[in-house]
Image: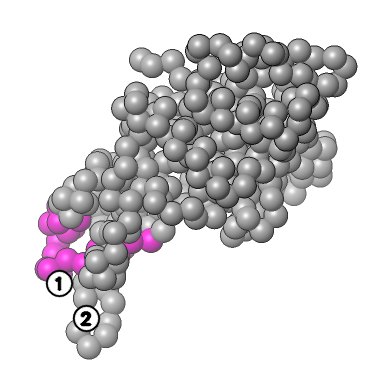
């Protein structure tokens, strides 16, 4: 098993299912948070000297042979704008997350290349290419797909540490903050679990110096987050210190969409319908696992879970098929 650094692990989560050829709003948010993850990564690797609240990058960090290209890109960008390469943690994180559009694109190549070299990230046809209207229009869309086993390992480790009693590592403390800032929290936790996540974050804020330093920091950039809605933790929680003390509102950043897959058979039985949908997806390069069969099956396409709902569109000629809807955590 490959030992990934913090920014690489978070990139596996944040870049998965993002369009690889376009700089969408969702991908901008992801990349800005990955840039912040690089600062946390070198911070955990003791690359700074600290005097009171000031963090100064050690002089030899950029000269070390094991410095990753994506780390070098972020650190050089920061030092270029600040000759001393110093500031408090809040300053480092915010400046790293505010790269220009041109630098964001270069940074994307650096971080994605580091994962591609490990065979943990690849570009495949976007699932939208299976949609009737995109397919018929001949639109070519590519997306990133993170290695399924490594993606599951990372997400399961985060869930285990934060939802179960026990020690929480510095890496997970940082990952939870990154998930919150990137709007990815709902990808891993149900609505009920988010209450426990909020409570756990507050416990960590009280007991762990790293959490106390990081959790109050917000690097979101207003409208760029493209937040569809805010999920508010139940009123009873919001009124407590957990809800009000550190603003534990978790934004939802929707990265997946509903897909309509047309089928030749008008009234095929559920087994035949599922077989045809699976065949269509796999023919486009997607990995499909059936989690639950039935009239409305649940399937996992690459790293995202969908409900396959029978559907029809009506125009001059009715078109029957299945609409894939991302299944929310309950």
Q: CA distance from mark 1 to mark 2?
A: 9 Å
Q: Residue at x 66, y 58 (%)?
A: 223
Instruction: Give the vertical position of 270 relative to 240 (above or below).
Output: below
Q: Which residue is located at x 15 percent, y 56 percent?
A: 276
Mark 1 residue element = loop
Q: Is residue 280 left or right of residue 93?
A: left
Question: Would you say the residues marked 1 and 2 are in contact, meaning their CB atoms lie under 8 Å apart?
Answer: yes
Q: Is residue 292 magenta?
A: no
Percent across and percent down for residue 31 are 55, 41
Let me know if residue 82 appears in the view: yes
Residue at 25% of width from left, 45% of height from top?
286
Relative to residue 8, is residue 180 depicted above or below?
Answer: below
- Residue 142 screen position, x and y as percent: 33, 51
Q: Which residues are magenta?
A: 258-278
For the question of whether residue 196 can be seen, the reply is: no
- Number of other residues with Cα within 10 Å of mark 2, as a class: few under 14, some 14 to 19, many 20 or more: few
Which residue is at the front of the view, 134 or 313?
134
Nearest to N terminus: mark 1 or mark 2: 1
Q: Between tags 1 and 2, which lies in front?
A: 2
User: Residue 262 magenta-drawn?
Assistant: yes
Q: Secondary structure at mark 2?
A: loop
Given residues 269 and 55, the one toward you in this image is 55
Disc 1 designates what residue? 266
Q: Quadrant of residue 122?
A: top left
As rendered, which of 146 and 83 lies closer to the eye?
A: 83
Label 2, on which residue?
318
In the rendered structure, the answer to whether residue 44 lies left or right of residue 23 reads right
Residue positioned 42% across, 27% down in the render: 114
- What number is the disc on residue 198? none
Can you name the residue that lies furthest to the right here? 52
């Amino acid at each position: 098993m490959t030992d990934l650094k913090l920014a690489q692990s978070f990139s596996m989560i944040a870049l998965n299912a993002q369009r690889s050829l376009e700089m969408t709003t969702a991908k901008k948010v992801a990349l800005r948070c990955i840039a912040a993850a690089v600062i946390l990564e070198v911070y955990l690797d003791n690359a700074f000297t600290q005097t009171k609240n000031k963090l100064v990058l050690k002089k030899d960090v950029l000269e070390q042979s094991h410095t990753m290209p994506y780390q070098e890109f972020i650190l050089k960008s920061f030092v270029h704008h600040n000759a001393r390469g110093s500031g408090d943690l809040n300053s480092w994180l915010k400046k790293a997350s505010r790269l220009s559009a041109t630098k964001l694109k270069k940074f994307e190549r650096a971080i994605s290349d580091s994962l591609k070299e490990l065979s943990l990230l690849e570009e495949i046809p976007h699932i939208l290419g299976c949609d009737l209207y995109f397919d018929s229009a001949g639109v070519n869309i590519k997306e990133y797909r993170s290695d399924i086993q490594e993606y599951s390992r990372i997400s399961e480790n985060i869930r285990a540490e934060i939802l179960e009693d026990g020690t929480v590592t510095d890496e997970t403390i940082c990952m939870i903050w990154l998930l919150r800032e990137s709007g990815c929290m709902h990808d891993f936790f149900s609505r009920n679990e988010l209450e426990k996540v909020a409570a756990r974050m507050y416990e960590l804020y009280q007991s762990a110096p790293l959490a106390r330093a990081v959790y109050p920091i917000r690097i979101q950039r207003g409208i760029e987050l493209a937040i569809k809605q805010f999920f508010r933790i139940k009123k009873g929680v919001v009124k407590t210190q957990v809800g009000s003390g550190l603003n534990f509102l978790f934004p939802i950043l929707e990265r997946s969409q509903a897909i309509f897959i047309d089928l030749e058979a008008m009234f095929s039985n559920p087994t035949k319908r599922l077989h045809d949908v699976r065949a269509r997806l796999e023919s486009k390069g997607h990995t499909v696992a059936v989690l639950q069969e039935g009239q409305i099956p649940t399937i996992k396409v690459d790293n995202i879970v969908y409900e396959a709902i029978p559907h029809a569109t009506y125009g001059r000629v009715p078109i029957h098929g299945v609409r894939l809807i991302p299944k929310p955590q309950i």
